[in-house]
Image (cartoon, helix red, strand yellow):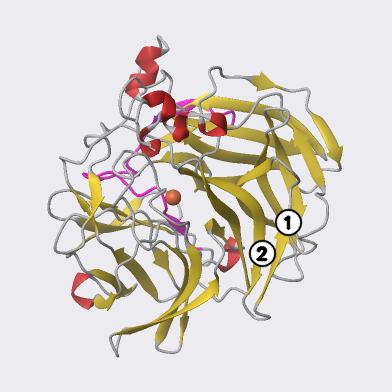
Amino acid sequence: MTVTENPFLAGNYGPVSEERTETDLAVDGAVPAELQGRFLRIGPNPHVMPTGPYHWFLGDGMVHGVELGGGAARWYRNRWIRTDEIAAALGETPVDGPKPPIYDGSNTHVVGHAGRIYTLTEGSMPYELSPTLDTLHRTDFGGPLPSGFTAHPKVDPVTGEMHGFAYWFAEPYLTYYVIDAGGTLVRSEPITIPRAVMMHDFAITRDNVVFFDLPVVFDLETQPFPFRWDDDTPARVGVMPRSGGDADVQWVDIDPCYVFHPMNAYDDGGTVVVDVPKYSTMMKHSRIGPNDGAPPALERWTIDPSAGKVRTEQVDGRGQEFPRVNETLLGSRHRYGYCVELVETRDAFDSARYLKHDFVAGTTQEHDFGAGRLPSEFVFVPSERASSEDDGWLLGYVYDAATDRSDLVILDAHDFASDPVATVHLPARVPFGFHGSWIADA
Ligand SMILES: [Fe+2]
């Protein structure tokens, strides 16, 4: 495959070439006045178009943000994260902070914790951003983070702690971390697993931590991204009591599969329930992105560690990813979950409709953004005086193929299928990317 044929460099997967600050944003509808803060989402955006093999996960990180306040959209900004390579390419002084373990990337998630904003890529050192998206420095939360940090930490809504982990190509292959509510790393717990695997995300419940030890193994000979599916490696989930450690992890075998993102997990009696978009394989066929076959369907896994069993049920057979919940319920039982529908096109995945699952009623609603309008991940923001789990808004970028620009779309989560509450028109497109957060004003 030539670079020009790489679907992750074409269409709205392709990079944008300039950083912009735009304050004159047209809005259809009404931005809810209580939304005071910034919607931030990050993704790969190569600064220089690759001339060799390119994997979507390895593009330079660019964050796209819209600040809302007083019922208005105040600005749109997009900025490359100033890794050392990007700072040099832009002729800027490199930022300070602990050196990255090996890989220096920051393209996967942007999260708020302890009043600060971090951009994250697994195996790399976190970067801190200013509220206007300037890169301030790298950080290790007081450290040490010898193998970097996951892109998918979980901020516990009850304790305010941030739980995370890191995986590595040498022992310890996995380490569990806790960063306290003030932003300081307070716990490092090596976890025993038999080999180096790609562990993209994990889950927490009120009482447990869930690890996914799945058969995508580290292999330096696999390029440009050194991980591949291995038919001979078993798949397991591990449940560790939050009050325990490595010796307390109960591992349960499951059928081979891959999971990038659990939607949420919770304790139910002696079991742990976790909802996951499940891939049959990952990186068995594709060397350029997560497009290894059919897009993942949504399953509910009920893990019984004592019995050594996992019961799986399909929730929805449509292809879907980027699962999110109302994160005030992270680690607790959720009724609603939201996913972006994925369809297979052009050797990549394109997004389609947005889905709201009701796990109590057993139903799924759809939001259709219109012909040629394709969503990225959305984020749930609870309303100030929420009276139900879905009392709030869903914010996300939607690419419009007809105009080759993107919008920030705000949906009423309770009135999911209806027209958006507000659509903020951006003067640029936001390439398909990864994850983001709503960073409310302090
Ligand atoms: Fe992710």
What is the x, y in percent for residue 369?
74, 48
Say if residue 172 shows up in the picture.
yes
What is the x, y in percent for residue 418?
82, 57
Q: Tell me if residue 342 comes above or below residue 278 in the rendering.
A: above
Is disc 2 placed on a helix, strand or loop? strand
> In the rendered image, which residue does mark 1 sit on?
367
> In the rendered image, which residue does mark 2 sit on?
356
Q: Label 2 neighbourhood size at 10 Å, few (<14), some (14-19), many (20+)? A: many
What is the x, y in percent for residue 39?
63, 41
Is most of the magenta stretch helix, strand or loop? loop
Q: Are marks 2 and 1 in contact (CB under 8 Å)?
A: yes
Which residues fall within the magenta stretch?
131-156
Q: Quadrant of the C terminus?
A: top right
The picture quadrant where one finds residue 99 is top left
**Is 135 or 51 nearer to us in this picture?**
51
Kind of residue at badge 2: Lys
**Is 178 or 100 nearer to us in this picture?**
100
Residue located at (67% from left, 34% from top): 66
Residue located at (55% from left, 52% from top): 343
Magenta highlight on residue 149: yes
The picture quadrant where one finds residue 136 is top left
Disc number placed over residue 312 in the picture, else none: none
Of labels 2 and 1, earlier in sequence is: 2
Q: Is mark 1 within 8 Å of ligand 1?
A: no
**Is 7 or 353 nearer to us in this picture?**
7
Q: Tell me if residue 321 comes above or below residue 64 in the rendering.
A: below
Q: Quadrant of the N terminus?
A: top left
Kind of residue at badge 1: His
Q: Taking 220 as reference, is 281 left or right?
A: right
Which residue lies most toward the top here?
Answer: 91
